[in-house]
């Protein structure tokens, strides 16, 4: 405290930070990157452990016997689905009623803002079917959910069959203290969104759905099941939800504990755990696993039906059956017993899962990185913005004013408010145009150009984004003196640096992965740019680190992490598809990544583009 309260010492510290500003920034950046990369090294991580006492032991006896019967039910479901050309609602209702459940249906419809070319749909109409197994030993104030999406073709029929088999088996057990809801939702995420909105009496996306006639207790946890083969080699758990939310770590720990007990191969991000962590290949494997989680979390989209539960503070995950043609095989009976064990432990919960972590990264299922370990990596990047802002503040404080005869005056000149306000307003108006115009002008674009609605939306977004680069020539015309000119860009950069620091800090608290990726690219550009650097090279550098190019690089990097590299042409088409999907995720489910980038990140980047071309 004496260092900051003593004026002489404080001034000496400021002089040191300004004199060594650039070297300190370089060290902080590379230290932040090195810290993050070191998080995947096993000695720097923590072993996973069960924090919730009610789930601390896997000592339950799993007895589910009807795996083959469940697969037969799945084949029957597939035949009826093919016969009616969609979800066999009547057959599902009769089958659930025959298993002793209270069965209800919910119809829903949704018109997309523009066609989804990935799934070839525009007007979506469907029906959800769910059955409730009432708790025989409790006042029915709490519930658990087991869901299986009804997807087109032959996908996920086995999951529906296993769901119905578990419903029949659970019905004959007397130890349930919570309602168990068995849900078959149509049209994957859209159907799940309609059911969750109906269950919680909310409508946050403008979807049309019929009110639910039957309802259980407050939902404590949920699992979504995806199986597309009679025999699987491993089970993969998917945790990433809407806007980067993650379920309580104890849910993943519970899955891993029962996989270890029953002897099922389990993966995360589709990758098996390796024991050779001290080798280069083992470390590389852990880095790939962790980076896949970072990329998925940063996208902000739900990577399974479970992702929409997290908005309602319901801990949820998706369990996927993977058939990778390994020698090790797992049958449906074993998977059923694993789910039975998990639900019996969740049935013991006396309160919601809350004792373990909600903010974490997983380089493997047996080790995790807590928020206290990974936030310093982001902090080292964010402190660069504050150091550069401090340097500018010192320069502005020491800037002398000049009188008409060229002699320094005693009063300091301040640049006009318009020198900072004009770029701020125009940049944010451009961001607002990027957010609103693509969807609103799709019909006009289709009428005048030979493109589809989806192509019109994406190309309009790219056009508005590119048009923003021409704005610097029109945002600063000053009749002031030369001194005011030099102070003007410094004031604007000081405001932009503080703006970016607050923006990245708030983003990292909500979605660390997105905040870290943006900091990784925007911080060097923000720290480097001035009006005095070479224009052509700096413009290329600034564009390469812009949000749009960051997304483009992320698409190729994600494909490399998945060991499915693509050519530049295929990568570009995938890039356009990702842009369209990001907009749809916002309008359909409430993803915040698109408005965050359009309304805040892009305008902030435009401020630095203005500084580069300051005249």
Image (cartoon, rainbow, N blue to C red):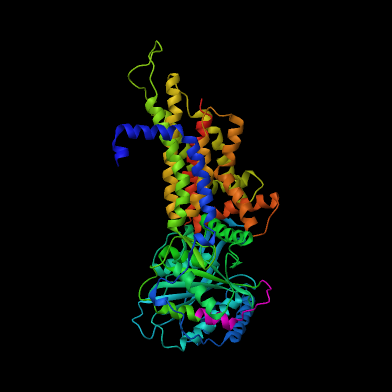
Magenta-span inclusion, residue 327? yes
Front position in the image: 27 or 133? 27
The residue lying at 48 percent from left, 80 percent from top is 341
Q: Check if residue 53 falls in the magenta segment.
A: no
What span is colored magenta in the figure? 324-339
**Quarter residue 158 falls in:** bottom right
Q: Would residue 309 be visible to someone looking at this image?
A: yes
Q: Which quadrant would the N terminus be assigned to in this image?
A: top left
Nearer to us in this view, 441 or 153: 153
- Looking at the rendered structure, the number of numbered marks drawn on it comes to 0
In the image, residue 573 sits, relative to residue 191, either above or below, namely above
Give above or below for 342 relative to 499: below
**Is residue 195 visible in the rendered structure shown here?**
no
* Residue 575, horizontal then vertical, whole percent: 62, 51
User: Which x, y percent locates residue 451?
Assistant: 65, 48
Residue 280's image quarter? bottom right
Give the x, y percent position of residue 180: 44, 79
């Amino acid at each position: 405290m004496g260092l900051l309260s003593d004026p002489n010492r404080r001034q000496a510290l400021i002089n040191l930070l300004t004199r060594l500003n650039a070297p300190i920034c370089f060290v902080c950046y590379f230290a932040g990157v090195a810290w993050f990369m070191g998080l995947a090294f096993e000695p720097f991580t923590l072993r996973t452990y069960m924090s919730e006492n009610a789930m601390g032991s896997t000592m339950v006896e799993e007895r589910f016997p009807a795996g083959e019967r469940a697969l037969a039910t799945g084949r029957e479901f597939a035949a009826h689905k093919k016969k009616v050309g969609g979800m066999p609602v009547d057959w599902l209702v009769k089958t659930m009623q025959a298993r002793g459940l209270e069965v209800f249906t919910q119809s829903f419809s949704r018109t997309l803002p523009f066609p989804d070319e990935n799934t070839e749909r525009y007007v979506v109409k469907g029906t959800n079917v769910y059955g409730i197994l009432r708790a025989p030993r409790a006042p029915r104030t709490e519930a658990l959910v087991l869901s299986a999406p009804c997807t087109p073709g032959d996908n996920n029929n086995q999951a529906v069959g296993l769901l119905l088999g578990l419903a029949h088996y659970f019905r004959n057990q007397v130890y349930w203290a919570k309602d168990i809801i068995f849900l078959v939702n149509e049209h994957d995420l859209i159907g799940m969104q309609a059911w969750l909105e109906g269950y919680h009496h909310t409508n946050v996306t403008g979807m049309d759905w019929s009110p639910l006639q039957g309802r259980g207790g407050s939902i404590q946890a949920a699992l979504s099941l995806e199986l597309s083969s009679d025999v699987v080699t491993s089970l993969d758990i998917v945790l990433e939800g809407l806007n980067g939310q993650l379920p309580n770590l104890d849910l993943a720990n519970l899955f891993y504990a029962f996989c270890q007990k029953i002897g099922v191969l389990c993966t995360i991000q589709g990758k098996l755990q390796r024991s050779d962590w001290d080798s280069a290949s083992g470390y590389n494997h852990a880095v790939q696993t962790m980076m896949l989680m970072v990329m998925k979390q940063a996208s902000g989209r739900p990577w399974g039906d479970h992702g929409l539960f997290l908005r309602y503070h319901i801990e949820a995950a998706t369990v996927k059956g993977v058939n990778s043609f390994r020698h090790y095989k797992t049958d449906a009976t074993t998977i059923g017993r694993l789910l039975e064990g998990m639900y019996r432990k969740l049935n013991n919960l006396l309160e919601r899962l809350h004792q373990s972590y909600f903010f974490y990264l997983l380089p493997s299922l047996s080790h995790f990185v807590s928020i206290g370990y990974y936030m310093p990596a982001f902090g080292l990047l964010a402190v660069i913005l504050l150091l550069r802002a401090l340097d500018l503040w010192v320069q502005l404080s020491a800037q002398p004013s000049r009188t008409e005869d060229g002699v320094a005056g005693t009063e300091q000149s301040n640049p006009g408010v318009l020198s900072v306000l004009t770029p701020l307003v125009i940049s944010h108006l451009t961001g607002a145009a990027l957010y609103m115009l693509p969807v609103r002008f799709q019909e006009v674009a289709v009428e005048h150009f030979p493109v589809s609605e989806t192509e019109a939306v994406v190309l309009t977004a790219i056009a508005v984004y590119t048009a923003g680069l021409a704005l610097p020539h029109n945002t600063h015309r000053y009749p002031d003196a030369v001194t005011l000119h030099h102070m003007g860009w410094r004031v604007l950069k000081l405001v932009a640096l503080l703006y970016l620091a607050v923006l990245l800090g708030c983003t990292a608290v909500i979605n660390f992965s997105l905040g870290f990726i943006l900091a990784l690219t925007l911080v060097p550009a923000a720290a480097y740019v001035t009006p005095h650097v070479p224009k052509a090279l700096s413009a290329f550098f600034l564009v390469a680190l812009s949000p749009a190019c960051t997304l483009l690089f992320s698409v190729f990097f994600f494909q490399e992490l998945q060991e499915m590299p693509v050519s530049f042409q295929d990568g570009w088409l995938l890039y356009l598809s990702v842009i369209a999907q990001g907009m749809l995720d916002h309008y359909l489910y409430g993803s915040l990544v698109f408005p965050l980038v359009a309304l805040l990140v892009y305008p902030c980047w435009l401020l630095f583009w203005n500084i580069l071309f300051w005249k």
